[in-house]
Amino acid sequence: MDSLQFSDLLRILIWMIPILFTVLYSIAGFFIYRKKRFYVYLKNQKKNQIEGVKIGYNFFLLWFSGLFFGIISYLRGITKYGIYFTTISIAIILLIIPYYFNFMQIRDLVTSENFVLIFLYYFYWYCSYICGKHGNKLYIKYLLSKGYEFANTDPEVIRILKEKWNI
């Protein structure tokens, strides 16, 4: 069995940086944001539905917004990032398929020379970070465009949201 060389460790590090950043950010965010949670409630008068949206960082979107070709982003009305995730997923599949059918080693695919795959990988995690950071704001804007109105929310909170998020 070969021992790991510096180039192998560098390759592993290149692929692990976004995941490590996301894990550390999630752990830190849990302790930072857990006492600052408050919700905005929106009501649709036609359907008599009420949606509660947490203000702040959305860790669910951070981890899962890009799964299954971005379907979660589409369901939450974040179509721009859903298109990004769909495009990235298709591009990664198209890059990996030749290696699968030619029985090439995946190690050959995951090299520092394959800049396109590394770029797509980092862009995927960047889009996931942005969805986590701005996902709730975009979801509130989506609900407001679908006919929802603010319900049972402090007027001061609504004023701050309108100033901060340009709703």
Image (tube, grey):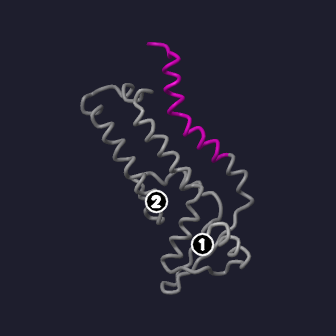
Q: Which residue is mark 2?
A: 73
Residue, far left? 101
Residue 136, compared with residue 6, is above or below; it is below
The answer to if 11 sits in the magenta stretch is: yes
| Quadrant of the snapshot with the C terminus | bottom right
**Residue 74 image position (x, y, % from top left):** 43, 62
Snapshot quadrant of residue 24: top right
**Dot label at residue 167:** 1
User: Observer-nearest residue: 136 or 118?
Assistant: 118
The crowding category of the residue bearing disc 2, from other C-alpha atoms within 10 Å (few below 14, some 14 to 19, many at least 20), is: many
Could you say which quadrant of the image residue 118 lies in? top left
**Region in magenta:** 1-27
Residue 133 forms part of the magenta stretch: no
Quadrant containing the N terminus is top left
Image spot of residue 64 (x, y percent): 50, 52
Q: Position of residue 157 (x, y in %)?
A: 71, 73
- Residue drawn at x 45%, y 13% is 2
Element class at badge 1 = loop
Q: Secondary structure at mark 2?
A: helix
x and y, in percent, of residue 54 in the image: 63, 65
* Closest to the observer, 31 or 122: 122
Left or right: where 86 falls relative to 45: left
**Going from the N terminus, do you reach mark 1 or mark 2 first?**
2
What's the residue at 67%, 70% (across, down)? 163
Residue 145 numbered mark, or none: none
At label 1, the amino acid type is Ile
Residue at 58% x, 59% y is 134
Q: CA distance from mark 1 to mark 2?
A: 20 Å
Q: Nearer the viewer, residue 115 or 37?
A: 115
